[in-house]
Image: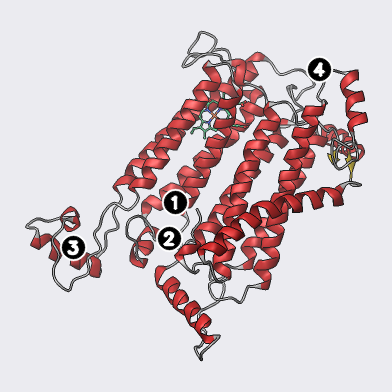
Amino acid sequence: MNAATGLQTSASLGQQLVDLAPLIELLLIGAGLALLPAAAVVWRARRQGVRGWPAWQRVLTVATLFLTLDLVIFGAFTRLTDSGLGCPDWPGCYGEMSPFHARADIHAAHEASPTGPVSPTKAWIEMVHRYLATAVGALITGLMLLAWRQRDEPGALSPWWATLTFVWVCVQGAFGALTVTMKLQPLIVTGHLLGALLGVALLTTQARMLDPAPLGEPEGSDARRARWANAGLRRAGFVVLALLTLQVASGAWVSTNYAVLACAEFPTCQGQWWPAMDFEQAFRLWRPLGGDGQGGVISMAGLTAIHMAHRMLAGVVSVALVVFAWRLARWRAQDDGPDRADDRVNDRMNGSTGFSASTREGRMPGVTLVPPVPVWRREARVLALLLLAQIASGLSNVVLGWPLAAALAHTFGAALLVWWLTRLLVLPREQATWRLLLRGQDARVESDTGSHQRPQLPPHQGLHGTASRASVS
Ligand code: HEM
């Protein structure tokens, strides 16, 4: 079957399989589900004394990010339990809003084919995945509406970010529908997983831009932020992120082609260092599940090539991540400004030269020191640990015969790596503006009883926010 006929067949198949009748009910369930985490974070944030739209925007964005990470794991669970076609139509289940309402059809399908894709359990797993996805969609829609309504609030993020996320969730929903209607076509399912991680990156970016936390622990400053913004290492980080994305795509290609069991040992495969592999067939992208793209069935050599390509790329990505983490752990915010001058004074006091001396106890009266400690040490450690866990879960998939827990951990690990690296590379808000905004908010509260003015801050520049108490992640 060539690509054009494949498309036509799938399109006509898709028309029969899409039944929009239960859409409204599904949206209501999703919105109801979204209210639960939203209510929980709103309650917690209120107790913490969160004030002002940018702080609320961050709280809700972080809540949506958490729910999206849950959705990524649940998506993997759906695939790994073979529940992707548990309801063979979309968006409902046999045209109903829940498997409970469709139980007669589900039981009939299950009895006709007990080992087939439909069973009551699989139908529930698939539908819970859709409910969760709708909940994420509801939160993102709410965030977009609020972002436009509050766009003139000082410190608010540009509403176009929320709009972009809304577009993303619609496209991702369409991919979810195609996953079902195109019968788990590997390219579509791979796109769906990549899309999920793109959503994680998008939400992380927004949460980080609204982040009141200083850049690097324990101290941060706008000078440091500016230096990180222009650092060559940060630019290299984007290259590492691109490599990681490629590795995620290659992993998704392994799992959506069910090539995991092509090699059951490590580091060799089928008892050889270089087993028989057909890379041309392996990367023929447009083909049905289990097919070779030319009307036949995918060969063992094709599956082996898919599996081995992921292993080899993992080597390259791991080296890139280790080097990046190592350099990150050593990165110091050096400059020739006042901080640097303080360092020299401090170094002289300690009778030594170099940045390390300024981290010692000695202090010149009246001089404020910003010690040039490595600011990313903790982040670098976490990155290395995440990579280690990812390699461990990947190896467990191979040598332990693909246990569910290892497969889930591997998907979740990939999402966490994307989250952490994105968080590192996106710049948090500027401290100076943040402090100004804080003062402004206090002034506004007082102005309810007095005559204070609102601060003159530029709206939606995307880098400002409010109280550190807002930090929930
Ligand atoms: C930087 C390191 C790695 C990253 C980011 C990564 C990422 C991924 C991703 C995103 C998937 C798809 C998961 C899904 O569809 O739910 C995957 C699948 C897989 N990866 Fe990796 N991987 C890495 C290293 C490794 C290593 C070292 C191995 C072992 C040799 C490995 C073996 C596998 C296997 C066997 C699968 C298929 C699992 C399944 O079908 O459920 N990975 N990988």
Point out which mark residue 183 bears: none
Give amino acid for label 2: Ala
Residue beneath the point at 33% across and 41% down: 326
CA gap, disc 2 to disc 3? 24 Å
Instruction: Please name the residue that numbered disc 2 is placed on.
Output: 213
Instruction: Please name the residue that numbered disc 4 is placed on.
Output: 115
Instruction: Please name the residue that numbered disc 1 is placed on.
Output: 424
Depth-wise, is mark 1 or mark 4 nearer the camera?
4
Decide which of tag 1 and tag 4 comes sooner along the chain.
4
- Do labels 2 and 3 touch, CB within 8 Å? no
CA gap, disc 2 to disc 1? 12 Å
Depth-wise, is mark 2 or mark 1 nearer the camera?
2
Q: Position of residue 437 (x, y in %)?
A: 47, 75
User: In the rendered view, would you say 328 is above or below 397?
Assistant: below
Ligand 1 position by quadrant: top right
CA gap, disc 4 to disc 2? 52 Å
